[in-house]
Image (tube, rainbow, N blue to C red):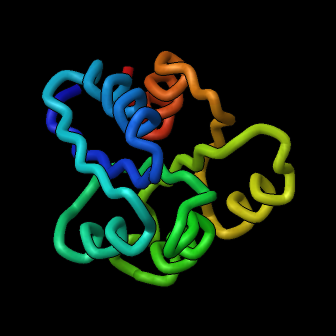
């Protein structure tokens, strides 16, 4: 249960901090952060990650476009994606899952919910 590398793509510094804290509970994990989808895709093109946590509503490039780019890349096609977005936007949730997101969390997210979801997706006991 050590050595996981995560990418958190989220425009809110406070939300990035909360998610990073939750991921830090996995011993030996490394978390990279990106404040928008463009920065996130640049990081994905140069580094390997075990999982992405991604906001949908961001400036410059939204999370749905990021999911499309990730799923279109054969090297990243199996990379687990957890989408985090504001409550009550059912279309965003459905669209994210259609595009290939593996899980969906509603803001405000709870750090234990992030931790549990990530463990489940990465099959960590």
Q: Residue 118: percent from the left, percent from the top?
A: 45, 34
Q: Is 35 located above or below residue 88 in the figure?
A: below
In the shown orientation, is residue 4 left or right of residue 16? left
User: How many circles with numbers are drawn on the protein?
Assistant: 0
Residue that appears at 56% across and 64% down: 63
Identified at 50% across, 83% down, the residue is 72
Instruction: Please state if 49 lies on the left or on the right of 67 as rendered.
Output: left
Locate the C terminus and report the quarter of the image it occupies: top left
Find residue 109 and report its horizontal and vertical position in percent: 58, 27
* Side of 88 where 117 appears, left or right: left
* Res. 79 image quadrant: bottom left
Examine the image and state in which quarter residue 16 appears: top left
- The quadrant of the rendering that contains the N terminus is top left
Q: Residue at x 61, y 57 (%)?
A: 56
Position of 9 with respect to 55 (left or right) is: left
Counting from the top left corner in percent of width and height, residue 23 is at: 33, 29
Task: Decide which of 37, 1 is in the foreground and name it.
Answer: 37
Vertical arrangement, residue 35 with respect to residue 116, above or below? below
**Figure check: 90 above or below 41:** above
Nearer to me, 114 or 3: 114
């Amino acid at each position: 249960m050590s050595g996981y590398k995560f990418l958190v793509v989220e425009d809110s510094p406070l939300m990035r901090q909360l998610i990073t804290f939750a991921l830090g509970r996995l011993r030996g994990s490394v978390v990279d952060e990106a404040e928008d989808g463009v920065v996130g895709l640049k990081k994905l093109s140069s580094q390997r990650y075990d999982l992405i946590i991604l906001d949908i509503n961001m400036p410059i490039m939204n999370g749905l476009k990021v999911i499309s780019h990730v799923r279109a890349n054969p090297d990243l096609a199996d990379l687990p994606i957890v989408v985090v977005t504001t409550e009550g936007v059912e279309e965003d949730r459905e669209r994210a899952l259609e595009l290939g997101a593996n899980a969906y969390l509603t803001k405000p997210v709870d750090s234990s919910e992030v931790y549990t979801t990530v463990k489940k997706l990465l099959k960590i006991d």
